[in-house]
Image: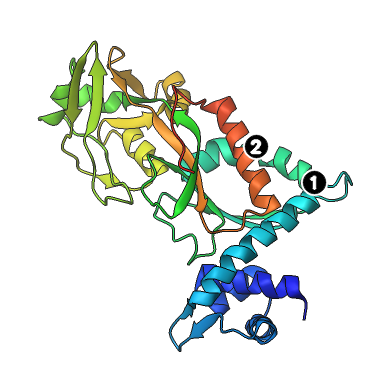
């Protein structure tokens, strides 16, 4: 029995709750993963997992052993990556999920440089704004906007998106130019609603000016759950749209969008890279997170001081 492979298989079964999913993430057969865990239990003379036809649960002894195993795996990974041998580079498949505008405009254009530096890393990228079950879907990390609410995740704050309020010229021709944000809450105005995955509904937007604070809810004819779709709706004149400045800048320069209310401000949206707190942070995941943080520092630096969840 290869004790390292056995411990790795056991840890992945605990993290995914399934021999099948563990086998998929390890690129092994389900039979091989099952045999490794059985051999590990035989060596330790203790039951690590309770198996039923529907799910796998870790035993009390298995939970204690798991905590020791992930630390050992992390130490072994650190030992390997600390070697001076230039041929020792992070390798393997990395599954990530990122918002579609961030992927299209920031992350993917910069990926060639990352893959040149780490040619043995293969990235499987999900592009969405949905809630992702990182363990159940075997996703290594997600990039998301907004304050993290899932306490099972470790979230690293990597930047803040400055945002503004925009409208298409065709929309303004039909409604007139609003002079105050509160006008957006009443006819003839509409906003483009955005449904946050964690809430499922559009939330009011807080706006500030010289000590004055208002919340703008607005009516909508369309709400979306994807940033690119929101941009498209704004460009089509379907309503006033709240957008990160990096998404709107090119369209403003081409005259396709007009920025409104320059004397009003919105809170910047914090961006986080999040991963499960019980996940073994591999070398490939560590270098990817650090790269995203550096990329965000260049494009959307951190505004003010925030406390990161540890």
Left or right: residue 39 compared with residue 300: right
| Res. 251 in view | yes
Residues at marks 1 and 2, CA–CA distance in whole angstroms: 26 Å
Residue behind mark 2? 110
Sequence-first disc among 1 and 2: 1
| Label 1 environment density (alpha carbons within 10 Å; few <14, some 14–19, many ≥20) | few
Left or right: residue 90 compared with residue 230: right
Q: Position of residue 59 (x, y in %)?
A: 49, 78
Of badges 1 and 2, the one in the foreground is 1
Left or right: residue 209 compared with residue 140: left
Which residue is rendered at x = 45% and y = 89% of the image? 53
Q: Considering the image in quadrants, where does the N terminus appear?
A: bottom right
Which residue is rendered at x = 59% and y = 70% of the image? 65
Query: How many dots with numbers?
Result: 2
Q: Position of residue 79 (x, y in %)?
A: 78, 52
**Who is closer to the viewer here, 19 or 269?**
19
Which secondary structure lies at badge 1?
loop
Label for residue 82? 1
Which residue is rendered at x = 49% and y = 84% of the image? 50
Q: Is residue 235 above or below residue 97?
A: above
**Who is closer to the viewer here, 296 or 51?**
51
Which residue is rendered at x = 25% and y = 23% of the image? 207
How is the protein colored in the picture? rainbow
| Res. 27 in view | no
| Label 2 environment density (alpha carbons within 10 Å; few <14, some 14–19, many ≥20) | some
Which secondary structure lies at badge 2?
helix
**Who is closer to the viewer here, 295 or 77?**
77
Quarter of the image for residue 140 reads: bottom right
């Amino acid at each position: 029995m290869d004790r390292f492979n056995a411990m790795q298989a056991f840890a992945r079964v605990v993290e995914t709750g399934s021999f099948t999913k563990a086998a998929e993430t390890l690129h092994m057969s389900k039979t091989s993963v099952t045999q490794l865990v059985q051999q590990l239990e035989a060596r330790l003379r203790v039951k690590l997992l309770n198996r039923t036809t529907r799910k796998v649960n870790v035993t009390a002894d298995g939970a204690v052993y798991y905590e020791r195993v992930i630390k050992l795996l992390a130490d072994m990974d650190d030992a390997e990556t600390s070697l001076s041998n230039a041929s020792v580079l992070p390798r393997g498949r990395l599954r990530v999920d990122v918002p579609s505008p961030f992927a299209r405009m920031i992350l993917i254009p910069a990926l060639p440089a990352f893959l040149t530096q780490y040619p043995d890393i293969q990235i499987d990228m999900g592009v969405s704004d949905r809630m992702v079950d990182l363990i159940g879907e075997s996703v290594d990390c997600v990039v998301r906007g907004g304050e993290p609410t899932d306490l099972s995740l470790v979230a690293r704050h990597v930047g803040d998106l400055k945002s503004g309020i925009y409208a298409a010229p065709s929309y303004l021709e039909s409604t007139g130019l609003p002079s105050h944000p509160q006008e957006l809450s009443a006819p003839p105005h509409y906003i483009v609603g955005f449904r946050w995955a964690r809430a499922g509904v559009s939330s009011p937007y807080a706006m500030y000016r010289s000590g004055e604070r208002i919340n703008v809810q607005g009516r909508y004819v369309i709400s979306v759950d994807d940033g690119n779709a929101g941009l498209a709706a704004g460009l089509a004149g379907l309503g006033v749209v709240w957008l990160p400045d990096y998404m709107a800048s090119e369209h403003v320069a081409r005259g396709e969008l007009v920025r409104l209310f320059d004397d009003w401000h919105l809170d910047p949206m914090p961006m986080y890279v999040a991963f499960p707190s019980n996940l073994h942070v591999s070398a490939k995941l560590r270098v990817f997170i650090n790269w995203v943080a550096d990329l965000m520092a260049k494009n959307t630096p951190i505004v003010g001081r925030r406390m990161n969840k540890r």
